[in-house]
Amino acid sequence: MKVLTLDDFDLKGMTVFVRVDMNCPIDPDTMEISGTKRIEEAIGTLQALKESKVVVASHQGRVGNNDYTGMDKHAKVLEKLMNREIKYVEDTIGEAAQDAIKNLEDGDILLLDNLRLCAEENYEFTPENAANTIMVSRLSKFFDLCVLDSFPSAHRSHPSIVGFPQVIPACAGRIVEREVRNLDEIMTVAKAPHVIVLGGSKVPDRLEAIRLLIQNGRADHVLLTGLIANVFMRAQARIKSPLGIKREDEVVAKAHALIGEYPDVFATPVDIAIDKDGARVEMDVREIAKTDKIYDLGPKTIEYYSKLIAGAGTVFISGPAGYFEKENFSFGTKALLDSVANSMATTIVSGGHLTSVLKRLGLAEKINHVSTAGGALVLYLTGEKLPMIKALEDAAKKYRSK
Ligand code: 3PG
């Protein structure tokens, strides 16, 4: 591997900064964590650090979104899962956080509060500038090693990801190690046609990635689901009224441009399901009315998409196909996962939501690579070098040349 791992260091007695990604789904009614998969995954690395003083840090949600909250709940979940004490401080880089770090003993684990409470963590930096942030200058002096294990945020050049490796040794944690090894292997055997099944809610990010996937020969067919399918149907004027999403005009214009440039690549739904007083009502896309809430794909779309999946050499699926948390509207998500699992292609399933549905369906064993990462994995597959991977490779070169 081009990056260092935990096995390259004598970890005993070290004070270690571990950047994890515990960004979990949050139930908007209770503000409680509704899926703990990413917290469960972090445990492997924490166990490997059992003789170190461990400071764990993550973001949760985006400032202004309704999943933006403190990490106190995450500390409780981790405590329960690991069946041991997890120290928690309601601070990120201030005096309280620094005192808590100074007081750690070997074997202790301390979780900091949501890193995005620190303004700097909401901006992209060059690695050199990230090293000069207040976050990195205040905290790095306490650490012997930085462990990057937040693969789902590997595409973000935030100070906690690209800043620390500039000033202290850095290596991959167990999640990043596994992801990089598996994905590198898969990408060397990946065959055309490449079918991408793309849903999820982070539409602007997805649009950028789609262009790169097509340009880099990684997407022969893009089958659209969820909110992004609605954006494309709006660009095709098949949905007549506004969707009411952020930056709608801009994203619809981008989708329109993509369809114009690559007319044979995109597949959009032919039928959908809407919510009518809690009931599922299926209809042709042409029948959608202004007030209808589109919550799922319809059976004709599943049949159409499943044929393309069956003919694929490689399939990558990311993001749920609809409002899968409601049983009535989980049909599309489940049916597409079933088609992917039963295809002869090399298969990759991405994102926390799909990963948990896959597990519930008992289909995980049939998939070549399952990852809780969403946007980061989409970008990784475009062939672009992710900021976290670049930071780890540079750190390894620096360490090995000493
Ligand atoms: C994710 O869930 O994709 C990661 O945690 C990154 O989150 P972000 O898109 O808010 O940076």
Image (tube, grey):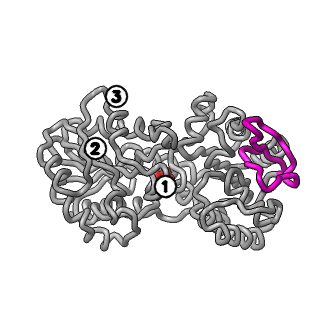
Q: Mark 3: few, some, or many residues within 10 Å (few <14, many ≥20)?
A: few
Residue tagged 2: 111
Question: Secondary structure under badge 2?
Answer: strand
Q: Which residues are magenta?
A: 270-297
- The label shown at residue 80 is 3
Quadrant containing the C terminus is bottom left
**Tag 1: amino acid:** Asn
Of the two numbered discs 1 and 2 in the rendering, the one whose residue sits closer to the viewer: 1
Q: In this rendering, would 87 be left or right of 125? A: left
Do the CB atoms of the residues marked 2 and 3 lie less than 8 Å apart?
no
Q: Please tell me how crowded label 1 is: few (under 14), some (14-19), or many (20+) other residues with Cα within 10 Å.
A: few
Q: Secondary structure at mark 1?
A: loop
Q: Amino acid at mark 2?
A: Leu
Residue 172 appears in the rendering: no
Judge left or right: residue 344 versus residue 203: right
The location of residue 298, given as percent across then percent down, is: 80, 43
